[in-house]
Image: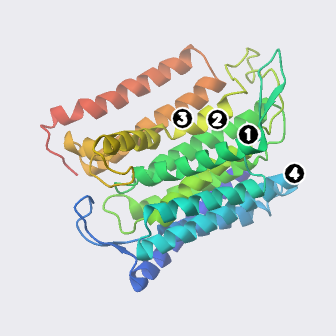
Amino acid sequence: MREYLLVFLVAASVTYLLTVIAREVALRTGAVAQVRDRDMHAVPIPYFGGLAMLGGLIAGFVVARELPFLSLSAPNVFRDAAVVLVAGAMICAIGVIDDLVELDALTKLGGQVLVAGFLIYFDVQYRFFPFPAPGGGQFSLEQSQAALLTVITVVATINAVNFVDGLDGLAAGVIGVGATAFFLFCYQLANLNDVSLAVTGALLSAALAGVCAGFLPHNFYPARLFMGDSGSMLLGLMLSASALTLTGQFAITDIQQGGGGSEASLLPTLLPIIVPLSILVVPFADLLLAVVRRTRRGQMFYHPDKQHLHHRMLEIGHSHRRAVVIMWLWAGLIGFGTVVGSLYAGRLTWLALGLWFVMTAALTFLVPRFRGLHPVE
């Protein structure tokens, strides 16, 4: 755990420092978000936050290779992590080009599919899903099925994160919370299966949580730098690829809760898929609602508007900062709730999650009424 914490801190520190350089590069190259009708910022803000994030991820990877425990892990741990980082650099480059010249939606989609194909080529994809005991066994995917499911997962996650990136600090916070929850899942899944704690998914998610933490001080309202498509697509790619590295990695076992001896409510068949999806429920819900909304209006799904979830939070009376924090809480409730509820099912767990839900719902729907629908920053 201490080595993963060090990876987190290195990724956060490097991202924080590189953000200053990325901002200067964006200003010099003209990669600046101008003010448009659908945007929430009032003055032009530079892009290229994704470049700082990529630097933080690489720094975390390099440091991890030199640590006493992680450096002795199985070869596939760093091999898969390196493949994901190269794919991250590819998607970040596409985002940089978009931040400079604004690519059309279909071109970006083609780039996303290409990057997903790169992951598949190097065998970072869905392989098989284990059946829970006592029957055991596994469900193996055909190559075409595995490739299609992988592409859909990667592309959908990238675009879901892109859609939720509408308020200062929102996407970085949601993905940071999600990456932390996914780290906990990977780490504990390895621990409960009694296998090495050096897991690719845990390594990548620790670094991903770190870069989000390092970027937030520059991106929280009022933002001095936007992550741009170079950052949002990078975050989506890293989170989805972390899940891909986990699938099929663990043997089929009767997992017991540590210390208590009672059986955990973990379904090995489903959770490697459910947990990553649950972490992204907020951006996925926003993406689905946007597609339905625009299709009903006779528009293409990628046509922009100002009816995303974060826009509605502002409409009902929340301030910019409060809306962002509340959406972090919803993302944390769903992500951590799925992880903790699956690994440590019990009365205390459900009570804590119930209290979290009541608090978050009250902040969402009652606070604006008590404040007279007047946002206060």
Using the image as rendered, state which of residue 172 and residue 355 is in the foreground: 172
Mark 1 or mark 3, which has the lower sequence index? Answer: 1
Residue 86 image position (x, y, % from top left): 69, 65
Mark before the other along the chain sequence, 3 or 2: 2
Amino acid carrying label 1: it is Thr
Q: Which residue is mark 1?
A: 247
SS at circle 2: helix
First in sequence: mark 3 or mark 4?
A: 4
Q: Which residue is mark 2?
A: 273
Decide if residue 60 is in sight here: no
* Neighbour tally class for label 1: few under 14, some 14-19, many 20 plus, Cα within 10 Å: many
Q: Which residue is mark 3?
A: 278
Query: Considering only vertical position in the picture, is 282 above or below 362?
Result: below
Residue lying at 59% horizontally and 55% vertically, measured from the top left? 237
Residue depth check, mark 4 versus mark 2: number of the one nearer the observer: 2
In three-dimensional space, the C-alpha distance between marks 1 and 4, rounded to whole angstroms, equals: 16 Å
Ranked by sequence position, the earlier of labels 1 and 4 is: 4
Measuring 60% from the left and 45% from the top, which residue is drawn there? 153
Q: CA distance from mark 4 to mark 2?
A: 23 Å
Residue 330 appears in which quarter of the rendering?
top left
Compared with 81, 353 (above or below) is above
How far is disc 1 from disc 2 in space, using C-alphas? Answer: 8 Å
Q: Residue at x 74, y 60 (%)?
A: 83
SS type, badge 1: loop
Contact check, label 1 and label 2, Cβ < 8 Å: yes
Q: Amino acid at mark 3?
A: Ser
| Mark whose residue sits in front, 3 or 4 | 3
Q: Residue at x 66, y 26 (%)?
A: 343
Label 4 SS = loop
Q: Which residue is mark 4?
A: 74
Mark with earlier residue (4, 2): 4
